[in-house]
Image (cartoon, rainbow, N blue to C red):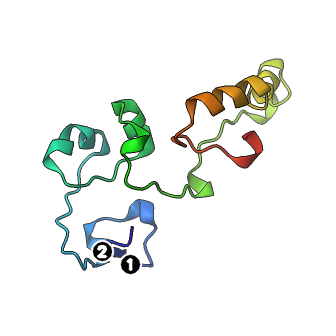
């Protein structure tokens, strides 16, 4: 959002208060366990909440001020052991993800763009 700047040497996922190099709005930033943030919203002006916590807390996607761009290295993927890749059940999972029924479900349930969906599954 441009509200703070981080040390360019630190990976954003590893950033802490010590890595803030510029805070032009003099924001009072409180670090807390992500699972506690939804319970603390009444006491905060803004919160940065991981998507999985937002989903678990039942927070509507429409309430977001902004959403992050998902870096490919942080996308959740389904994987199997090499020995299982050609098994019937693994192939059934692949087929389900690529099915028209799944695309229809996503179109219905993901109208707000809450879930990141890779292009090959859209």
Percent x, y of residue 13: 43, 60
Q: Quadrant of residue 113?
A: top right
Looking at the rendered structure, the secondary structure element under dot 1 is loop
Q: CA distance from mark 2 to mark 1?
A: 6 Å
Vertical relation: 8 (above or below) 48: below
**50 or 104, which is in the foreground?**
104
Vertical relation: 1 (above or below) 96: below
The disc placed on residue 86 is: none
Question: Which residue reaches farthest left?
Answer: 43
Percent x, y of residue 66: 42, 56
Q: Are marks 2 and 1 in contact (CB under 8 Å)?
A: yes
User: What's the residue at 31%, 45% (across, down)?
Assistant: 34
**Left or right, residue 121 beside residue 26:** right
Please tell me how crowded label 2 is: few (under 14), some (14-19), or many (20+) other residues with Cα within 10 Å.
some
**Label 2 sits on residue:** 20
Percent x, y of residue 17: 26, 67
User: What's the residue at 59%, 48% (across, down)?
Assistant: 75
Question: Which residue reaches farthest right?
Answer: 86
Q: Quadrant of residue 8?
A: bottom left
**Label 1 sits on residue:** 7
Please tell me how crowded label 1 is: few (under 14), some (14-19), or many (20+) other residues with Cα within 10 Å.
few
**Left or right, residue 94 beside residue 36:** right
**116 or 111, which is in the foreground?**
111
Q: Quadrant of the N terminus?
A: bottom left
Q: Quadrant of residue 103?
A: top right
Question: Which tag, 2 or 1, sits closer to the chain's start?
Answer: 1
**Left or right, residue 7 beside residue 80:** left
Looking at the rendered structure, the secondary structure element under dot 2 is strand
**Left or right, residue 57 beside residue 67:** left
């Amino acid at each position: 959002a441009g509200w703070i700047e981080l040390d360019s040497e630190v990976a954003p996922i590893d950033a802490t208060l010590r890595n803030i190099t510029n805070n032009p709005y003099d924001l009072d930033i409180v670090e807390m366990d992500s699972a506690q943030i939804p319970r603390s919203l009444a006491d905060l002006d803004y919160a940065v909440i991981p998507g999985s916590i937002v989903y678990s807390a039942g927070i509507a996607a429409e309430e977001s001020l902004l959403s992050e761009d998902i870096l490919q290295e942080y996308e959740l993927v389904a994987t199997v052991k090499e020995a299982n890749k050609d098994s019937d059940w693994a192939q059934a999972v692949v087929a389900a993800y690529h099915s028209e029924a799944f695309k229809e479900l996503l179109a219905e349930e993901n109208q707000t763009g809450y879930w990141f969906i890779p292009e090959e599954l859209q």
